[in-house]
Amino acid sequence: MKKNVSLVIPLHNEEANIRILLAAIHQVFLGLPYNYTVLLIDDGSKDGSMRVVREMAAADDRINFISFSRNFGHQSALKAGYDHAKGECVISLDADMQHPPSLIPEMLQRWEEGYDVVYTIRGEEAQISPFKKRSSRQFYRLLNRISDVEIEEGTPDFRLVSRPVLNVLKDLNEYDLFFRGLIKWIGFKQIGIIYQQQKRVHGASKYTFKKMASFALQGITSFSIRPLYAAAYLGFIISLFSILYVPYVMFSYFTGNAISGWSSVLVTIAFFGGLQLMILGIIGVYLGKLFMQAKQRPQYIIQEHLLHETP
Ligand code: UDP
Ligand code: MG
């Protein structure tokens, strides 16, 4: 019996890419001794993606889909894929052909060698903007410095995970999902392989600067509480300094120079105002996470699905 491999593909407005990607996957598996099934996760697409998805799934019973009631985000779509995929291992990849299906044989080979997670690392010549490259590098540096999980630079959500890992992922019910960190955190036998990222075939990236920034903040605050400590230390150090400032103020008062302190008072007020807002902000982000988690809402809502029975 051939082993069954599931491919999980989150997509949001990828109408023009779906057929191309599925054809490429089909080609790759022609030469491999595995059965495959595809699970497309439509993350609230507004274009004709769903029409294409329905057509493809009706014509080929290896193709399954789940469609969300609205846009829940890439990580939630991945979670739905991990929750519902039935294969002995799952490979997740983007719908825009940036994650080349030609890497699948190597991933499967590593899995057969006994690795539970085969993650990928973007090679140097990746076809992405210099800005994205730089911001991504800075983000991973910061994340690694302040959290306990070590994530290599440029590791996207293009990976293979084995059934034992999937069983763990299914039970994780974090509201703010950040799979790159979670995968590292859960352990098991892992290996990274390098690939050259391609250009997006059609359409534009859905990760705007705003989305990337919020993703970065989510990643850091999901894996580290050190910013909270940093805020506390900073507050402590600054109050120490302000206590040292008191003798100076008294001195000025007694020597009759009090009014000349006007500018220093303004500077101090502005500085402390900013500092307090920043620290409150940090605390607020964590409080917000607790709030969202406390509500226990599902990470996604399925509106429509077609999951073929596969052996
Ligand atoms: N995606 C998604 N939901 C979103 C945004 C993106 O499911 O809200 C999908 C998208 O269709 C693609 C993958 O996530 O398959 C990565 O997105 P994109 O290519 O836009 O990001 P980039 O490669 O620029 O980081
Ligand atoms: Mg992309």
Image (cartoon, grey):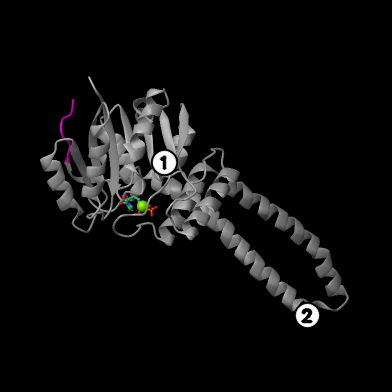
Give the residues in magenta.
306-311
Q: Main secondary structure of the magenta part?
A: loop
- Residue for point 39% across, 43% down: 157
Farthest top residue? Answer: 1
What quarter of the picture does the N terminus occupy?
A: top left
Q: Is residue 126 magenta?
A: no
Q: Residue 263: x and y, percent?
A: 73, 77
Specify the quadrant of the image occupied by residue 109.
Answer: top left
Dot 2 alpha-carbon crowd within 10 angstroms: few under 14, some 14 to 19, many 20 or more: few
Q: Is residue 243 left or right of residue 202?
A: right
Q: Which residue is mark 1?
A: 179
Whether residue 299 is visible: no
Residue 259: mark in rendering: 2
**Mark 1: which secondary structure?**
helix
Which quarter of the figure is the C terminus placed in? top left
Please name the amino acid that badge 2 sits on.
Answer: Ile
Q: How far is mark 1 from mark 2, CA to CA?
A: 57 Å
Between residue 91 and residue 122, name the one nearer to us.
Answer: 122
Q: Which is nearer the eye, 171 or 207?
A: 207
